[in-house]
Image (spheres, rainbow, N blue to C red):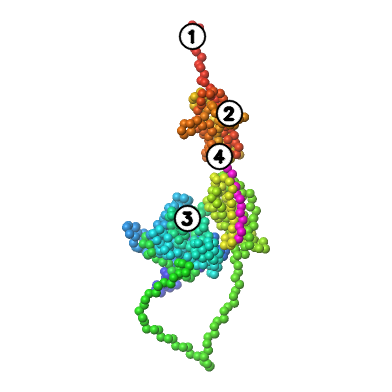
Amino acid sequence: MVAHFGTRLRKGAMTTAVAAAAVAALSASQAPGVTTDGQGRQTTGADAESTPDGNGDGSATGNSPYYTDLPPLNTPVPTPTIGTPAATGEAEAGIPATVLDAYKKAADSLSASKPGCNLPWELLAAIGKVESGQARGGNVDAAGTTITPILGPVLNGNGFANIGDTDGGAYDGDSTYDRAVGPMQFIPSTWEWAGEDGNGDGKKDPNNIYDAALAAGNYLCRFSWDLSDQADLNSAILSYNNSTEYLNTVLSWLEYYRKGTHEVPDGTGTLPSNRSDGSDGATTSPSPSPSPSTPSTPSTPAPTPPKPSPPSGGGTTSPSPTPPGPTLPTTPTPTQTVDHLEDAGTGTLTATAGDTFGEQVAVRTETVAGKAVAKVRVRFTIVGDTTDATFTGGETVATVVTDSAGTATAPALVAGEKTGDFIVRTTVVGRTLTGLDYTASVTARQADTLARTSDTALTCVPGGEFADQVEVKATYNGAVADKVAATATLIKSADDATENDKGPYFKDADGNTVRTLADLTTDADGLLKLPKLYSDDTTGTFLLRITTTGGATLTVELTVAAAATPEPEPSATS
């Protein structure tokens, strides 16, 4: 699909050479990584290709139509905003105030939560321009919610992706098919896991520009992409809408906005007009009301055109209706041929807290006859809030396209600190089929060896305090065992591990006697330093036992004895 240049070049009689020069200049000056071939077509260094599989749910928008209008060739001049925003400079460089605020707040949030992503707010503005014309020129209320819902076309496979209803019409008002929703045009199935609460009102609303902008930012920053890198930037944009033309258009607006923008009042933004589907804009409601007509001055009726002369040779003939053409069979998409999911050799999913799982979830999409189906999107979802495990990159949802063998392998799982079992659910995107659930287990960090870091004898006088604190180092299979849970108890004897009621003790924050310390944890170097020890008036040898998760145990000997009485010096007469 070739981007529309007509709105920029229609004035005057431009020669082919002039038009070609304008296209080349636009490509070279406004889209980093974009080049123009001899026919004026745009390509990118990312070698990006549109590869929809018929359902489009591997993208944020379901590969819905978008605005193809390109920015002006003139460079905008940034204008500082003082007092009431005013539309100055290039009209196309004006961004409605609330929409602009949402983009900047989202970028600020991402700079704190995902600093390595390097998300510029201008990228959100570029995508917002291409997806909805900045929320239809900033047609939002004071809270940032669109005054009229912005809905894309019905994704029924008729010229678009075929995505059956996934939300019961909750977001898009359509209980048969999905539609892209809101100023950033998320499809409901993507919003379900990618939605964010950007304005802190406790709701995740795709029709709110603050929520949608933050969700778009998080979506672009998944997979640990660094958007200051051109290849990662291209990948992120293509993941939003998988089209080379879309990539080029967004890059053009990104570069344009980077050169300067200004704020305009809400509702006064410039509306684009050209769409990739040939329409003039996204549907604003399931059943749009007709626009009120403007009264016009009566005019003289147009003359009735003359009837055509009858053909030579005889009487009149009436034009025959064109018979309808044959109905062509619809070729099912690969997704539509999938009957079920099969396991593709997934091993046992276990890992220690903080480690990467050694096995990855792998499934195969098959027809009813058991034939593998390639180019189908499979979604892997970590279910529930009882775990803090993620896929590589920190996400809890990943979508993977099946290979030529029909196999999709999820990114590696990374265990968090929460222990126990959780579920990884696999489903076919765009189909309502029974998925496969995999149980994964996270075990606590362990140590198999404990050793003191000093061999100094631990001694104390009755009623005194020990000069040295006990410090131990934990290891597991010879490596440092960090963040391992431990317990320290002053026990009665080597054969009786119950807590002692006399001898050495610790003190709590209030100075009370404590002889068991729970909830201890080794540090990043596997070290654990216990608080200072004190003793009552009981003398003797006592034992301190330290145990860790994984079975490591160390018993430390403590001695309480009266200070030795110095022998008297011999007298002078003896």
Q: Residues within 10 Å of mark 4 (few under 14, many from 20)?
A: many
Callout 4 amino acid: Val
The x, y position of residue 551, in whole percent, is 60, 37
For the residue marked with disc 1, what is the amino acid? Ser
Towards the viewer: 205 or 333: 205
Mark 3 / mark 2, whichever is N-terminal: 3
Q: Nearer the viewer, residue 326 or 181?
A: 181
Q: Nearer the viewer, residue 18 or 328?
A: 328
**Residue that carries the numbered disc 1 in the rendered image:** 571
- Residue with the most extreme front position: 501
Query: Are the two marked residues, 3 and 2, in contact with CB atoms closer than 8 angstroms?
Result: no
Amino acid type shown at disc 3: Glu
Tell me the residue at 61%/59% (across/down).
Answer: 434
Which of labels 4 and 3 is toward the front?
3
Q: Could you tell me which secondary element the residue under label 3 belongs to? A: loop
* Magenta span main SS: strand
Q: From the image, state whether disc 3 or disc 1 is nearer to you.
A: 3
Q: Position of residue 6 (x, y in %)?
A: 44, 70
Q: Name the residue tied to disc 2.
A: 492
* Magenta region: 433-444
Above or below, comparing residue 283 to residue 526 in the picture: below
Choose the circle earlier in sequence order: 4 or 3.
3
In this rendering, which labeled residue sits more in front, label 1 or label 2?
Answer: 2
> Is residue 12 rendered to the left or right of residue 455?
left
Q: Quadrant of residue 76?
A: bottom left
Can residue 231 be seen here? The reply is no
- 210 vs 488: above or below: below
- Residue at x 54%, y 83% (from the top left corner): 321
Q: Which mark is residue 484?
A: 4
Q: Residue furthest top?
A: 573
**What is the spatial separation of the Cα atoms under label 1 and label 2, in whole angstroms?**
46 Å
